[in-house]
Amino acid sequence: LHSLPQAFGRRIAMSLSAILHLITAGIVIFVGILLTMAWLYWIGAFLFIIMLFYQHLIIKPNDLLRLNAAFFITNGIASVVFAVFTILDEILF
């Protein structure tokens, strides 16, 4: 398996994940400002960003029991929540 944890170890892979989530949060905020989105977008963006960072609270490099919950469930919920709020924002405003 060729993966970041395999190549660099869990700690570096998790640090890279946190950095990429920070970049993602910045892009979500930048796009919201750039497109002057209304309040529904910002609620969705806030929830999305909170869920991204929640993933890092529930897993540790030496304890990956909740990895599936963090990756599959939280990412899935975060994406759907953000999409719904963004779509509603576009439809209503």
Image (tube, rainbow, N blue to C red):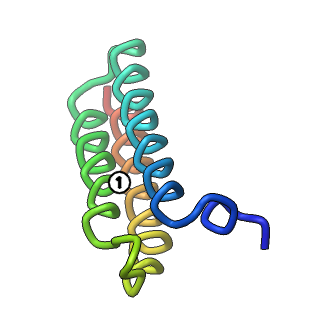
Q: Nearer the viewer, residue 13 or 55?
A: 13
- Along the horizontal axis of the image, is 57 left or right of 34? left
**Percent x, y of residue 42:** 25, 34
**Percent x, y of residue 92:** 32, 33
Q: Find numbered disc 1 in the image and state the secondary structure of the residue it sits on.
A: helix
The 10 Å Cα crowd at callout 1, few under 14, some 14 to 19, many 20 or more, is many
Q: Residue at x 36, y 81 (%)?
A: 63
Check the image and report above or below for 54 versus 58.
Answer: above
> Which of the image's four quarters has the C terminus?
top left
Q: Residue furthest front?
A: 8
Hey, what amino acid is under mark 1? Answer: Leu
> Which of the image's four quarters has the N terminus?
bottom right
- Along the horizontal axis of the image, is 10 left or right of 93? right
Q: Which residue is mark 1?
A: 52
**Percent x, y of residue 30:** 39, 20
Check the image and report above or below for 30 versus 40.
Answer: above
- Along the horizontal axis of the image, is 39 left or right of 5? left
- Along the horizontal axis of the image, is 84 left or right of 44? right
Q: Within the image, what quadrant is residue 69 found in?
A: bottom left
